[in-house]
Amino acid sequence: MAEFVGAIDQGTTSTRFMVFNHDGLEVGRHQAEHRQILPRAGWVEHDPAEIVRRCRECVEQGLAAAGIEATDLAAIGITNQRETTVVWDRGTGEPLHHAIVWQDTRTDRIIAALERDGHADLIRERTGLPPATYFAGAKITWLLDNVDGLRERAARAEIAVGTVDSWLLATLGDGRHCTDVTNASRTMLMDLRELAWDDEMLALLSVPREILPEITPSASPDAFGVMRINGTEVPVAAVLGDQHAATVGQTCFAAGEAKNTYGTGNFLVLNTGSEIVRSEHGLLSTVGYRFGEQPVVYAAEGSVAVTGSAVQWLRDQLGVIDSAAQSADLAATVDDTGGVYFVPAFSGLFAPYWRSDARGTIVGLTRYSTKAHLARATLESICWQTRDVVEAMIADGTAAPAELRVDGGVTANDVCMQLQADALGIPVTRPAVAETTALGAAYAAGLATGFWRDQDELRAKWVEDARWEPRWSRDRRDAGYADWRRAVERSMGWASTEG
């Protein structure tokens, strides 16, 4: 009997494949980065073919690291960067353009037109999302209108389009064109209550239904087909967008439970059970997950575009640090930011502001300011943006969490996690398996195939690894947040969204 479950975690900057045993513990992994293609300001692209190559490499090397064969896997789960959009030839399987990444802002004029024409309220009501460049629907519109011949080929159903999960299933699997409800809920095209493509949304964005994938549950023993690994067919039993997978990995199965994932961006997800909570303060209503034929679980989400990638910017664009880990050491050499605030609005501001006209801003610079102050301001920007989301949840009538469960690569930065506890005034706790995105995909696949019995069995596997208690006084915390909000105001209105 197969003793392991695998998970492909296809993220914004890298892909990893992880293998977990029945105790939910990692037994092997491999990770590989892929290129960030930046054709012009505000544009972010990936090479879909490179992503597939990285996935194949990671699966092969991850199995080798675990010392097992594909036959030892009960199933594979896939989790992916959401909203990133791929278009490919339905016959040959070849990509027809670079993937347009979720951070990309080239659709700002499409979004501005939707708002100008009075469609914003309908979009929010039907899809749970505000009109924003973040989501996949407008990216599809842009591709159809700007890639030569694509709209004509779409009318003949010669092309397929989808988010990264659909692309991976089409290329790594047995060619099925499908997506799960969590990824579909991030397109601005799906009716959040009916869990189906919505005719009015398709018409607003001029997207033909025929090129879209079939919408399926997040976990199913047969919806996604198989992946062929070295001649072995392994069932793909789960597909979830990355933040939904992390919610499962943190075992936030009950309404009111929340997690925050720190990766390229920052994503705080609150389980709202069977209820669609309509936010009045900039949060998203979204699908949490759906396991098989069980009722769908909904969630409220605060999505922040730039957090971990701000640290990468310090490293790659400015050369302030040589490695992401060095940001903690450098920030720890000063007691505060010296009055410096960094708003990393490289792709506009997401929750709770939703301002595509915002751009990255550094304020409070003096001759006293050093690269250490900038490094600390960068880490604090991650934490203040999380507080923005928590404040929005409180304003919507949700009780502030008693503690914050965290996961993702940035949680290895102890300085940042201490600052997060300080900024929120509540404890921050990290589980023993910090890569809960991959773990959640594995959990969902294991539940679908009977590898794990039920959600209670998974809850019992959650173990705390580290905990940070707040140290700042309330006065310091609130004064810092007030200055952060002033800095955010100064980032707005910089980029034009007019035609």
Image (cartoon, helix red, strand yellow):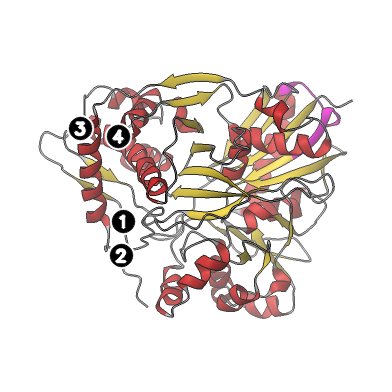
Counting residues from the N terminus, which is met first, the one under dot 3 or under dot 2?
3
**Residue type highlighted by circle 1:** Arg
Quarter residue 457 falls in: top right
Relative horizontal placement of residue 166, taking residue 307 as reference (left or right)? right
- Quick one: SS at disc 2? loop
The answer to whether marks 4 and 3 mark residues whose Cβ atoms lie closer than 8 Å is: no
Q: Amino acid type of disc 3?
A: Asp
Q: Residues within 10 Å of mark 3 (few under 14, many from 20)?
A: few
Quadrant occupied by the N terminus = top right
Q: Residue furthest right?
A: 1
Residue at mark 1 to residue at mark 3: CA–CA distance: 29 Å
The residues tagged by marks 4 and 2 sit, at their Cα atoms, a distance apart of 26 Å
Query: Which of pointers 3 and 2 indicates the residue nearer the eye?
Result: 3
Tag 2 or tag 4, which sits nearer the N-term?
4
Q: Which residue is mark 2?
A: 495
Q: Which residue is mark 4?
A: 320
Q: Is residue 94 above or below residue 228?
A: below
Q: Residues within 10 Å of mark 4 (few under 14, many from 20)?
A: some
Mark seen at residue 475: 3
Regarding mark 1 in the picture, which secondary structure is present there? loop
> Camera-side residue: 384 or 163?
384
Tag 1: Cα neighbours inside 10 Å, few (<14), some, or many (≥20)?
many
Amino acid at circle 2: Ala
Viewer-nearest of discs 4 and 3: 3
Query: What residue sits 52% from the left and 38% below the top?
Result: 258
Tag 1 residue: 359
**Image point (74%, 74%), residue name:** 157
What's the magenta region?
66-76
In-image side of 113 versus 77 (left or right): left
